[in-house]
Amino acid sequence: MLLVRPHTKPSARSLIPICPFPHPYFFVSQASTLSYPFVPFQVHPPHHVRGSLLALSLHSNEVTIRFHTGPNASALQWLTPEQTAGGQQPYVFTQCQAIHVRSVFPCQDTPQARIKYNARVNIPAGLHAVMSAQHVGTEQTADAARVDEVFAMEQPIPPYLFALAVGDIAFKTLSPRVKVYAEPSQLEAAAFEFSETEEKIKAAEALFGPYGWGDFNLLLMPPAFPYGGMENPRCTFLTPTLLAGDRSLANVVAHELAHSWTGNLVTNADYSSFWLNEGWTVYAERRILEALEGAEKARLDAAMGWLDLQKGLSRFTSDTGSSSRRFTQLDLGTDGLDEFDPDEVFSEVPYEKGFFFLTRLEHAVGRPAFDAFITKYISKFAFQSITTATFLEFLQAELPQVMEKGGESWVDVEEWVRGQGMPAEAESIVPQSASLAAVQRAANGFKADPKSNFGRADASDWGPDEWQIFLADLPKVLPVETVVRLDEEFGFSKSKNAEIRVGFLTVAANSGATQFHPEVEATLLSVGRMKYLRPLYNGLIQGGAKDMAERVFEEAKAGYHPVAQALVSGLLKG
């Protein structure tokens, strides 16, 4: 049951878009108000992206909608005990970004329509629930075997930040405002990996102002979770692939934390301006990294981002169709955009091109002036959802010198925002990193002579980041004997660092190195993160093992989130 209180006075006929995906996944049984026990309603036929329109005849300022969600709702992942780390209890979780919360409850599923919510979650007494909201308390019910967990989110959030997880979940307190939640068998490993979270919060506050969401809790998800992290307020969801044992992948926490200011607090009004969430957040993340680990570490991370951006751009520019190249812009515009599913065009472009645009602005006016701009930007638009046009108006008002063509601080803002690919002036901010240069020299030498004696002595001072760059810089296809020799020398296929292991296995799969197919299969059966599924399945297909890819997917897909299932299915069909 959903009680809806519109923020504005309703008309005689109000329209609420919901997304049943299609009707069998979502059922509205009744709508009512205090005065009208049966409010007429109609659910319109679904649009393949926008969902269905729920039309209600309203004459009051609130309405109660009775509904139930089907087991195949696209935001929900239902796991059997065997699909969890502990293997004893079932588990359910939501992943609502980009446009999937409407498969959980009827709503206007756009980041422009911010919501507050209260929730009462009825669950078996032996399980635990967490939400993107304050936990108010646990209440007993008439059924002694079940309890009600009560939550309240009193700050207005975009609907995609609604989040719920229920399972065999325990927690450990890391600081007064940070708890880490996980299945009991993974709790200590998660607590170690994320033990420096409070230091990250303090560094972020020094840069962007007080953290305004109360708790910053972390939930280590089951393997089926499709993303690296999800910035749900008060409870960030994190993939278990971050458990490297040495905190080398924990910087994902800094990214999700940065969303507390850029994304959750100031939000893109629609997905044509997604860079306002992600480009700003990558910028904020790297400022946190610089504050904690130094400028060279931040430059290396930016250099890795530059390499990722080139791959993201090539995904769209390799297609000569203008509709594809559109997705190399920051501002996508709105014409025809409702025909594109945001999940299908997800890429590094809004993240990294957005970061480099903001870096270009910082270089043009200097860091002190840009920091003052950031403070004003966050203050002015807190708890609002804005478009690129609104951002540009604010930029013009606060930093007019960057818009003055011919001036020494001029930035080609139009080309950055609405141009396809990267502007010519981007060459002036390509990150220069001594660590990156050293790795690329080694990688270039290896590519020139794969039979060289490149070994541990040549990389004795490399850390996980350097190895990720090296593997990413290798040719897509290598001689099988070279792939085998690399693994014998460095043990990539057994690395606890998922970025290193998957990076190597991707090369092995593309190269047709069947010796590593068992490791590839084991990874695909145990990991649901789309960042890894895409290259590994693609690698099997390109390496001549499509039959294996189809067989593994048939076995693994029940453990993938619906969004990930759609991704892999599309790869196999393509």
Image (cartoon, helix red, strand yellow):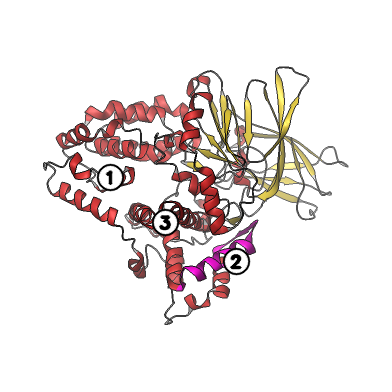
Q: Which residues are magenta?
A: 365-390
Q: Which residue is mark 1?
A: 462
Viewed as shown, does residue 182 lie left or right of 108?
left
Would you place residue 366 above or below residue 148 in this image? below
Residue 342, visible in the rendered structure: no
Closer mark to the observer between disc 2 and disc 1: 1
Horizontal side of 167 relative to 5 (left or right) equals left
Residues marked 2 and 1 touching at CB (< 8 Å): no
User: In the drawing, what numbered circle is on residue 376?
Assistant: 2
Cα separation, mark 3 vs mark 1, equals: 24 Å
Q: Secondary structure at mark 1?
A: loop
Amino acid on which the number 2 mark rests in the picture = Lys
List the residue tagged with mark 3: 352
Quadrant location, the C terminus: top left
Compared across the picture, whether 240 is left or right of 534 comes to right
Q: Is residue 164 magenta?
A: no
Residue at x 58%, y 26% (from the top left corner) = 167
x then y, percent, for residue 295 = 39, 57
